[in-house]
Amino acid sequence: MSAAVYIVGVGTTPTGKFPDTTLHQLTATAVRAALADAGATGAQVGMAYFSNVAASYLQGQHMVAGQVVLRELGIAGVPIVNVENACASASTAFWLACQSVRAGSTDIALAVGAEKLYDANKQKSFEVFGGGFDVTRRDELLAYLASLQAAAGTPEATVPPTDRSVFMDIYAALAVNHMQRHGLTQRQLACVAAKNHAHSVQNPLAQYRDAWSIDAVLAARAITYPLTLPMCAPIGDGAAAVVVCNADGLRKLSAAAPVDVLACELVSGLNRRDEDVDLAITRRAAYAAYERAGLGPDDVDVAEVHDATAFGEILQTEALGFCAQGEGGRFAESGATTLGGALPVNVSGGLESKGHPIGATGLMQLVELTQQLRGQAGLRQVAGARVALAENGGGFLGNEEAVACVTLLGTGSH
């Protein structure tokens, strides 16, 4: 980045189903923790970006959610921007916060994401995801997914469409296509899920903390082939906040423990052919980030990637250059992405196990990685971690995500 940007404060709630906790309360917990971590007050925040996806549909808070929940925390009178970018909303809020301090519009900015996604009527929670693509072309999307499944002769889904997110169908169809083209196996998908559930055992804030064996993952309830329940991210609530600053802001927060934002690249999808993998959205974001930071995939010590399903992790490890195209399944099966492996991925438990409160997810990834780089991750600490990568995607258009953000964090330059 052209000017130094630092993460100086992080805070997060647990992820889970919290029917008696309000959006205000979740936000307050995360923001107060982030401000305390930075040694800052709400009055020092010059701009704030509030990420949320579901409050309009599920809680009826159709507008100004950020102003509503932040005012009582002492963040008022300054620019507050409400951000929605599907499952990449939180990382988009972070990108905006970085842009504002890099440009000098403010010295200290706040990115916060909060979500009340769980509803007693689970079907309503799943319906939120129905707006993550071009709704005027829903029939075209479903026909495209059906064509991928039919070409492989895969089994019919065993869970009614009303009992799962449409994105499970999207990931399942892409996984089947990968199986046909590259030899991915269902067992390799189970390796990813079992690994991430094992990681979450050491994360006290994770939604699920139960270990699963590979065989147990394969034998679990089918959702839509080849995905079983433990391969899929759950519905849940949560919030996360990150305070960023520039060099002038850092001097105002002398007690902070800064982490360098080496790069943060936000891109949108293209109309591309399936075979044009070098134009894939995550690959473009990742290699733009590597170029800006003067790094490459081999420099990354730990990564948090968007594993809304186990296939998501396989897809992204390939796009990020951690392994060759088509080798993601074998890369996971080798143990390379396990804590203690060559490149630990999703040591938080990932979306599959840590949870996926949409509007908070990208910031939760950055909280985890900041703690990793500070050496504060406890039993899931990656030894000697100095460079960390977060990948967060959202929506679906054509044959890939609508939006993707890749962030590189590091230590030692300040």
Image (cartoon, grey):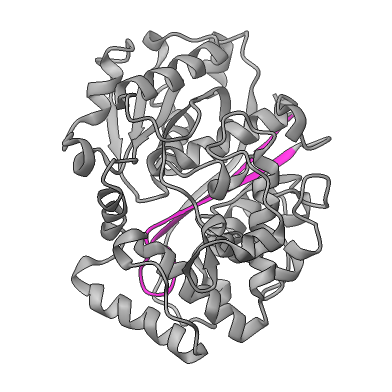
Q: Is residue 163 visible?
A: yes
Q: Is residue 314 visible?
A: no
Is residue 404 found inside the magenta-colored segment of the image? yes
Please determine whether, in this image, residue 284 is positioned above or below residue 344: below
Q: Which corner quadrant holds the N terminus?
A: top right
Q: Which one is in front, 356 or 122? A: 122
Q: Which one is in front, 137 or 208? A: 208
Residue sitting at x 62%, y 28%: 204
Q: Which residues are magenta?
A: 387-411
Q: Is 267 left or right of 373, judged from the image as shown?
A: left
When asked about the image quadrant of residue 297, the answer is bottom right
Residue sitting at x 34%, y 24%: 21
When asked about the image quadrant of residue 314, the answer is bottom right
- Residue 334 is situated, as x and y percent measured from the top left of the image, at 81, 63
- Residue 71 is situated, as x and y percent measured from the top left of the image, at 26, 15
- Residue 243 is situated, as x and y percent measured from the top left of the image, at 49, 23
Q: Is 237 left or right of 327, judged from the image as shown?
A: left
Please determine whether, in this image, residue 38 is positioned above or below residue 222: above
- Residue 127 is situated, as x and y percent measured from the top left of the image, at 26, 55
Q: Is 270 left or right of 328, judged from the image as shown?
A: left
Q: Which corner quadrant holds the C terminus?
A: top right
Q: Which one is in front, 348 or 119? A: 119
Is residue 389 found inside the magenta-colored segment of the image? yes
When asked about the image quadrant of residue 329, the answer is bottom right
Count of numbered badges drawn on the protein: 0
Residue sitting at x 49%, y 42%: 362
